[in-house]
Amino acid sequence: MYLHGTASINDEGHLEIGGCDTVELVEKYGTPLYVYDVELIRTRARSFKKMFEKHGVDAQVAYASKAFSSIAMLQLVHEEGLSLDVVSGGELYTAIAARFPVEKIHFHGNNKSEEELEMALDHNIGCIVVDNFHELHMLHHLCQERKQNVHILLRVTPGIEAHTHDYILTGQEDSKFGFDLENGQAETALAVCLDSEYLNLLGIHCHIGSQIFETSGFKLAARKVLEKLSLWNDEYGFISRVLNLGGGFGIRYTEEDTPLSPEQYVEEMIFEVRKETERLSLPMPEIWIEPGRSLVGEAGTTLYSIGSRKDVPNVRKYVAVDGGMTDNIRPALYDAKYEAVLANRPLDKHDEVVSIAGKCCETGDMLIWDLPLPEPGTNDILAVFCTGAYGYSMANNYNRIPRPPVVFVENGKSRAVIKRESYEDLVRLDVPLSEKSTI
């Protein structure tokens, strides 16, 4: 059994997280339930920051809030001195509601609307990462109309294919994201920026993918971008003050995963950028990175109650829980793999192999295939590890199932930071066909 962060087995023989007994958490908050280990999030945030400080490199570590966004989460990010990435008006609105410092907000996205850009300009956020010509021209015209300056980065695709799932590749040439670095698009975008009196181009952004377990892709991307920046310096006199190398740092979901530590990712990035800038006679840029999953993924655990069971002789044993693809769509979407234990008796002997089914009306609603467990019963609680990234943020109401609450645990105390949805919440925005009430 691999335990993440502060997770341990307490004297009652129960799984404990953040000093809180998971059985007691279920008694208090019910299931399904997302539980976040706050100390682990803090530790990860500090690990990413300290290597830049150790090497005296100006940097911003920006939490990629698409992994999990809520007011409390963003306030925790601010407490740890991080910047923030948002990719929609809703994520930006959440940041504003959390009173996150606007100068530390970066706005990503491949199809920002005019309303979203106006929202960003209204709040004078720190930086807009421009993804395409449509956005570039729209932003220029908005700033021209408002006579307002804005800091931007140009997102480029460096032609790097990281070793990850096809759906989460982002840096290759054939991608919906960014200006291509090799076919002249990036130079054309640069010219637009340099001709504009309102667009203040800080530098370049690239992102090569997610759940990456090595540094070679990051280093190759840095080399390719810096070589292009050297040409731009010679041809246009442009000096990039910022080099954003994105995120995508992998985490351990199962024993097959072998991620590096945050310190290793950062240190090798620093060495590569420093080496290349010296070789190309460029000034050392400020380095920005964007950890999301690597900050919150392993910090999250989802607790479920065991429900029905179906044994297919000589084929499979199905055990159902009271959640599924509504609170964790990643297995259905990516064929994502997870590990799990019975939270109320994690040390009992594993005497059978079962497959964990969700409760949705979909054959594909399976959370874990072939999981060794003690024989599970209806009084048991299943704890699925490493659900902190893209669990709640991708949660949905399929089959009109309410979304679970989110609880933060730290130093033996728990706090609900997102309430459980009710059936009333599900119909709150519905408009009846007639004025006669249906309830």
Image (cartoon, rainbow, N blue to C red):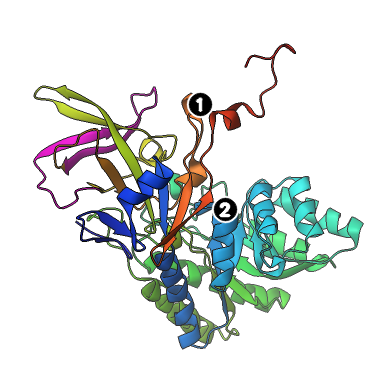
Instruction: Please name the residue shown 39% across and 66% down the image.
Output: 40
| Front position in the image: 155 or 337 | 337
On residue 217, the disc is none
Q: Quadrant of the N terminus?
A: bottom left
Instruction: Please name the residue shown 46% across and 52% down the image.
Output: 407
Whether residue 165 is visible, yes or no, is: no
Where residue 211 appears, x then y in whole percent? 39, 56
Q: Is residue 396 above or below residue 133?
A: above
Where residue 433 appears, x then y in whole percent? 70, 13
User: What residue did someone put label 2 on?
Assistant: 70
Q: Amino acid at mark 2?
A: Ser
Q: Quadrant of the C terminus?
A: top right
Where residue 184 appears, x then y in whole percent? 64, 58
Secondary element at image label 1: helix
What is the spatial separation of the Cα atoms under label 1 and label 2, in whole angstroms? 22 Å
Please tell me in which quadrant of the rendered image residue 367 appears: top left
Q: Which residues are magenta?
A: 344-372
Instruction: Please name the residue shown 51% across and 47% down the image.
Output: 174
Please tell me in which quadrant of the rendered image residue 181 appears: bottom right
Secondary element at image label 2: loop
Is disc 2 surrounded by few (<14), some (14 to 19) or many (20+) residues within 10 Å?
some
| Earlier residue among tags 1 and 2 | 2
On residue 400, the disc is 1
Magenta residue check for 355: yes
Q: Is residue 121 above or below residue 433?
A: below
Is disc 1 surrounded by few (<14), some (14 to 19) or many (20+) residues within 10 Å?
few
Whether residue 271 is visible, yes or no, is: yes
Magenta residue check for 152: no
| Front position in the image: 55 or 223 | 55
Q: Amino acid at mark 1?
A: Arg
Q: Is residue 429 above or below residue 37?
A: above
Where residue 118 appears, x then y in whole percent? 80, 52
